[in-house]
Amino acid sequence: MAQRLNAIALIVRDYDEAIDYYTRVLDFTLVEDTQLSPEKRWVLIAPPGSSQPQLLLAKAANAEQTTRIGNQTGGRVFLFLHTDDFWTDYQRMRERGVRFCETPREESYATVVVFEDLYGNRWDFIQMKS
């Protein structure tokens, strides 16, 4: 039997605001945007050059979900974005106003830096070493 993650839900404040940030600032691709009801949409995005897994942008639907926007993991790094061109992508992200929590560092396994997205979710941005 084979299984895989298809999508990871990311709670957001507003669909269009989130789509704009992830596609314009991080160059993600809008995979799908389907209206399900007057309040709910099915919005999938993916990093450039990747198709799986995708992020499902899930608009907070109540007060409890709203408290989780930007803090789905209690302040820990939530998502791990890999690249094959760290320094080019890092510079482009800086120019577009991405909030980095540290300076990039060379680890034995990768070049890595932590950044925060529009909502404050923490991401590791990584280029693995061969």
Image (cartoon, grey):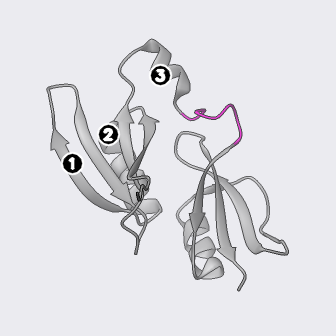
Q: Which residue is mark 2?
A: 15
x and y percentages locating residue 90 in the rendered image: 62, 72
Numbered disc 1: secondary structure: strand
Which is nearer the eye, 128 or 38?
128
Q: Which quadrant of the figure has residue 15? A: top left
Q: Are marks 1 and 2 in contact (CB under 8 Å)?
A: yes
Q: Main secondary structure of the magenta part?
A: loop
Please tell me which residue is depicted at 60% across the width and 40% down the height of the picture: 120
x and y percentages locating residue 33 in the rendered image: 21, 48
Q: Residues within 10 Å of mark 1 (few under 14, many from 20)?
A: some
Work out whether mark 3 precedes mark 2 in sequence or the reverse, and give the earlier one.
2
Question: Which segment did they paint magenta?
Answer: 70-76
Q: Which residue is mark 3?
A: 66
Which is nearer the eye, 72 or 88?
72
Please tell me which residue is depicted at 34% across the width and 50% down the height of the picture: 19
Q: CA distance from mark 3 to mark 2?
A: 13 Å
Does 126 sit above or below residue 123? Answer: below
Q: Which residue is mark 1?
A: 33
Q: CA distance from mark 1 to mark 3?
A: 21 Å
Quarter of the figure that contains the C terminus: bottom right
Work out whether mark 1 precedes mark 2 in sequence or the reverse, and give the earlier one.
2
